[in-house]
């Protein structure tokens, strides 16, 4: 049985595994648009949700110094990618999947 995989563009390579997830950008019907981030998975939920965190540097004009801050978002983790805690992943913005999920994991960076 030959499975059909979508080409999502943006230089993203589709995974070798197949899934039946309707929120998967490769095998489902969700479309990618908007911002792209690279971060580390810090928490994993059983409902195909992961928390992704990345550090950023912010300038404080009052003290004329930089400080470290972090951003955290929830992202959908399709079963064909199946990223785990500690993996560095690439996430891309999509339409809202749930109340707090607006991103989907599209790849694991080595």
Image (tube, grey):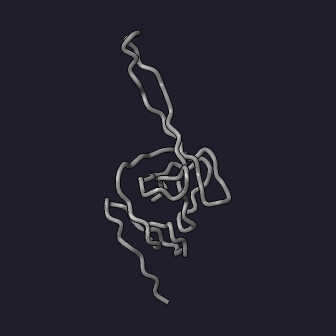
| Residue drawn at the location 52% of the way across and 75% of the way down | 18
Q: Residue at the top extreme? A: 63
| Residue drawn at the location 42% of the way across and 68% of the way down | 14
Q: Residue at the left extreme? A: 10
Report how many numbered discs are placed on residues in the image: 0
Q: Residue at the right extreme? A: 46
Provide residue 10's location: percent of width, then percent of height. 31, 59
Q: Is residue 17 left or right of residue 5?
A: right
- Observer-nearest residue: 46 or 100? 100
Q: Is residue 75 above or below residue 66?
A: below
Q: Quadrant of residue 25?
A: bottom left
Q: Quadrant of residue 60?
A: top left
Provide residue 73's location: percent of width, then percent of height. 52, 44
Asked if residue 1 shows in the view, the reply is yes
Q: Is residue 41 above or below residue 54?
A: below
Q: Is residue 86 left or right of residue 54?
A: right
Q: Residue at the front extreme? A: 99
- Observer-nearest residue: 90 or 35? 35
| Residue drawn at the location 63% of the way across and 47% of the way down | 43
| Residue drawn at the location 54% of the way across and 49% of the way down | 100
- Observer-nearest residue: 75 or 106? 75
Provide residue 84's location: percent of width, then percent of height. 61, 54
Asked if residue 110 shows in the view, the reply is no
């Amino acid at each position: 049985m030959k499975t059909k995989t979508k080409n999502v563009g943006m230089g993203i390579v589709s995974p070798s595994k197949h899934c039946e997830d309707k929120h998967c950008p490769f095998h489902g019907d969700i479309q990618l648009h908007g911002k792209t981030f690279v971060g580390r998975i810090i928490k994993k939920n059983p409902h195909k949700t992961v928390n992704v965190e990345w550090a950023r540097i912010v300038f404080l004009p009052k003290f004329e110094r930089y400080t470290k801050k972090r951003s955290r978002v929830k992202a959908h983790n399709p079963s064909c990618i199946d990223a785990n805690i500690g993996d560095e992943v690439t996430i891309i913005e999509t339409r809202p999947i749930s109340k707090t999920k607006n991103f989907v994991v599209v790849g694991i960076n080595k």
